Image (cartoon, coloured by chain):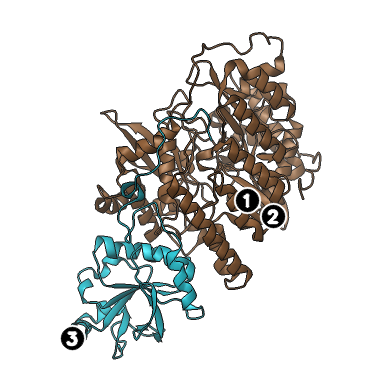
Chain colours: A cyan, B brown
Amino acid sequence: MLDTRKQIIKGRSVVDDDWSVLKLDEGQAPDTVAVPDGKVIVPVPVWLAQRDALAARAGQHGRIGIWFAPDELATAVQDDLGQFAVIAIDFPKFTDGRGYSIAFNLRRRLHYKGELRAIGDVLRDQLFQMQRCGFDAYATRPDRNIHDAVKGLSVFSETYQASVDQPQPLFRRQARGTEAEHTGSGA
Amino acid sequence: MYRYDQYDHLIVRERIAQYRDQVQRRLNDELTEEEFLPLRLQNGLYMQRHAYMLRIAVPYGLLSTAQMRTFAHIARTYDRDYGHFTTRQNIQFNWIELERTPDILSDLAAVEMHAIQTSGNCIRNITTDEYAGVAADEIIDPRPYAEILRQWSTFHPEFIALPRKFKIAVNGAVEDRAAIAMHDIGLTAVRGADGEVGFKFMVGGGLGRTPILGSVINDFVPWQDLLTYTEAVMRVYNQFGRRDNKYKARIKILVKAVGAEEFARMVEAEFADLKGGPETLTREEVERVAVWFNPKPYATLAAIDPRAGHADDKAFANWLMRNVKPHKVPGYAAVVLSLKKTGVPPGDATSAQMDFVADLADRYSFGELRVTHEQNLVLADVEQSKLYELWTQAKAQGLATPNIGLLTDIIACPGGDYCALANAKSIPIAAAIAKRFDDLDYQHDIGEIELNISGCINACGHHHVGHIGVLGVDKDGSEWYQVSLGGAQGNQAAIGKIIGPSFSAPQMPEVVQRLLDVYVRERVEGERFVDVAQRLGIAPFKEHVYATPIVAQETAGEDHHA
């Protein structure tokens, strides 16, 4: 099944998008499924099964991306990261948070620098935390207004902890309030 | 206590704006209920049996009097004039309207409070010892570290959609009063050979359907690595915790499945990349936070005998014995205000009582209060010479029942009267038992005993670790109660054993009576109920309880506030 969106959020803008996402239908096997021409984001198992052919294509045109399912680890393709024009992480349900750890590990541990796109059940109220974990592109759910969803990226202007977007925690970035003497009253 | 700086204020303010917008979108049907659910849960808003319930965070159980008065205001303005203090050191309001929750959050923000992550599959309120900072056996004051963990876990972007809820407790003393063995992560402060502070990491404890005590995965994590090591644990859990079955999704199941040694190895592999990184704590940051928890401006006092001048007042003596705890500073004591008066649901307080205890704290305890995981309140810094005066006032408001640690100091979840998950009621069972054993002389004779009641397998009443544990179960649509014995919290934490077939509600007071009969018969000098239960096992108790039919004695009563 080839899933094609017309628009995604990239950075903080809504842009046209001509990538499609290949998902295996029932009965399709990673080693034999035909990867269509054009800019295609393939599942990790398809990449691993058809690596040589897809790598040649990626090398020629820069037109192959991969996507991770939540139960796959960032390290599954760690030697190939330089070959992908885009890496996507699928959120089959917005309540499944494994994709955030995959993103973190791709960015911080494996130093992936290219586009990192959230796909699947991607809703406005997740975008802020996705951005913090290193996503920079969002294929939001097509039944929702994508322009409204952009607002989800700018909910907070400060955060306590370090993550991909901000590698220094608040306590290392800002001089924070202190009080040397208590006032004799708790509040 | 910790005070917000500009950043804390900013983050809470932006949270309210975000949540207000989410509520508006829900009311406009731009968000489905399914989508709204995790958003409202991460803000402590549940849909209960009758109405919305709002759970407000009381970080590590510490409250200012301004905060307590705000609870009273919320109870009066938005609810039915009372609130419920929980076993997680939080407070819940049971009759909340969705539309008004953003306004409640604004009222809370004005006194540096919020409801962030009090529910949902994320890191919850961090709990600790209610005597932190005043206990004589304290190695370190755990509260600065609890506050640092609170900030670190607030809106942690990676750990906001975990497989299940996640609870962390920190204990800084020799004796564990934070029940660390039943938490997802239980931390104990330890001092290394060079005197430096570190934490023993216990992981994978929890009650519920599968009660398991935590396993130590590291005996000494230096304080600098507190956040990075915790992050490593969280990342392992987020990636490998089960998500196919809600009941097998807690970290305890993962730790059990792979074994504590293998789990520790997985954590070390994550930690290797994080160690020494930017989240490594600095002395400057720990000191910045710790300064707020500095010892209070104690007067230089001589220790006195508070009974002096009141030698004939037996009621006062009882209260001193049960509700007044030692303090590390001479001339001071910690006072427990009992929320377990017979006839009142455990942990409930009216708005008038909340205002009143705030007044007491201002007058007698530097304007601070604590919430205990046994659902009582503590004034931690009372001058011994003021105890009689304080007692007289607390007694007039029904807050001086001298039953702390005794049979009627029952821990109970809200149960079927409120909770949509419950299989059975809890409050009427607690009420019936409290009524039956109201006689204080008898209670004092029985001595220390913990009776815990949960209305369902989720174990919010911590029944597994009760010396007597009561679990509400559903059998063919009617409510029954399963009894376990020998559970304990603290350094000798243990999971209780079920004694046999369950009982009806009206049988429960007599069941407790029969358990106590065996204890009184078998005890030797100084032995507590739990000691006898653990020494003899369940057999003699079981034999006596089931020897003759138990006649149902009284109905357990109706909903308390319905």
Badge 1 sits on which subunit? B
Query: Which residue is identified by label 1?
Result: B456
Q: Is residue B560 placed above or below B365 in the rendered structure?
A: below
Specify the amino acid type for callout 1: Cys
For the residue labelled by badge 2, is the local secondary structure a helix, a strand or a loop? Answer: strand
Query: Which residue is identified by label 3?
Result: A60
Image quadrant of residue B342? top right
Residue B274 place in picture, x, y as percent: 27, 51
Residue A77 place in picture, x, y as percent: 25, 70
Q: Earlier in the sequence, mark 1 or mark 2?
A: 1
Which labelled disc corresponds to residue B85? none
Query: Which residue is identified by label 2?
Result: B475
Specify the amino acid type for callout 3: Gln
Residue B165 place in picture, x, y as percent: 49, 54
User: Are callouts 2 and 3 both on one chain?
Assistant: no
User: What is the spatial separation of the Cα atoms under label 1 and label 3, in whole angstroms?
Assistant: 61 Å
Specify the amino acid type for callout 2: Lys
Asked whether residue A97 appears in the rendered view, the answer is no
For the residue labelled by badge 1, is the local secondary structure a helix, a strand or a loop? Answer: loop
User: Are callouts 1 and 2 both on one chain?
Assistant: yes
Residue B523 place in picture, x, y as percent: 60, 22
Residue extending farthest right: B554
Q: Count neighbours of disc 2 (C-alpha within 10 A) and say few if under 14, some if 14 to 19, many if 20 or more.
A: few
